[in-house]
Image (tube, rainbow, N blue to C red):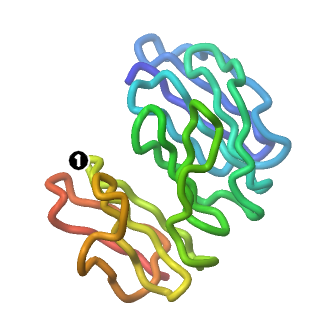
Amino acid sequence: GKLLAAGDQSGRLIVWNMQNLQPVYSIAAHEGRLLQLAFSPNSQQLATSSYSGEVRLWKASDGEKIKSLAASKFEITRLVFISDQLLACSGDDVTLWNVDSGQQSAVLTTGYAPGRALALSANQQLLVFGDKDGGLKIWDLAANGIAAGASLYGSAAEISFSSDNLSVAVYSP
């Protein structure tokens, strides 16, 4: 991409142009610490979150606010764009949101998930997340459900797929 985004403790969002390393804009994105940032795959939108459980969507090019999503009662610990229209959020539950309509399209977890880690495979077909049973689930996005035989035991603070999508690395403190 051509943009680099960062957030700070005061809720400020700063975006730089990576070609000339000059700031493009700096805005007060949230009232408190900015926790998560995610660019849409087409780099047109930027999602941000803080402790409030609210996700805010911005035009990546100029920082104009598009809309807010009341995504969780708790802080959002992970944001992942599945596509330009679909955003995964990990808060009190792992949820999918249609960013065009601003509506929640699915709740993936069966209850509060400690750790609330979330990762998307490189081919954008699988989403791994922690669930309330302390295990990890693998959601098949094409099938719109848990992949057959795809429950892993153990909680996770961080999850990462290999670039070939054949391996998943999990960190649990």
At 79% from the left and 40% from the top, the residue drawn is 30
At 60% from the left and 21% from the top, the residue drawn is 59
Q: Where in the figure is residue 27, as x and y percent of width and height?
A: 75, 25
Q: Is residue 29 left or right of residue 172?
A: right
At 44% from the left and 69% from the top, the residue drawn is 129
Marker count (numbered): 1
Q: Nearer the viewer, residue 140 or 81?
A: 140
Amino acid of disc 1: Asn
Q: Relative to 154, is 124 above or below?
A: above
Q: Is residue 130 left or right of residue 97?
A: left
Say few, some or many: other residues with alpha carbon within 10 Å of mark 1 (under 14 / 14 to 19 / 20 or more).
Answer: few
Q: Relative to 112, is 31 above or below?
A: above
Q: Relative to 116, is 16 above or below?
A: above
Q: Where in the figure is residue 55, as x and y percent of width and height?
A: 68, 44
Q: Where in the figure is residue 5, as x and y percent of width and height?
A: 55, 31
- Which image quadrant is residue 167 in? bottom left
Q: Nearer the viewer, residue 157 or 70?
A: 70
Identify residue for label 1: 123
At 48% from the left and 34% from the top, the residue drawn is 85
Q: Is residue 159 left or right of residue 50?
A: left
Residue farthest along the right direction in this orientation: 31
- Which image quadrant is residue 92 in? bottom right
Q: Is residue 101 left or right of residue 162?
A: right
Q: Secondary structure at mark 1?
A: loop
Quadrant where the image shows the N terminus: top left
Q: Where in the figure is residue 52, as x and y percent of width and height?
A: 80, 54
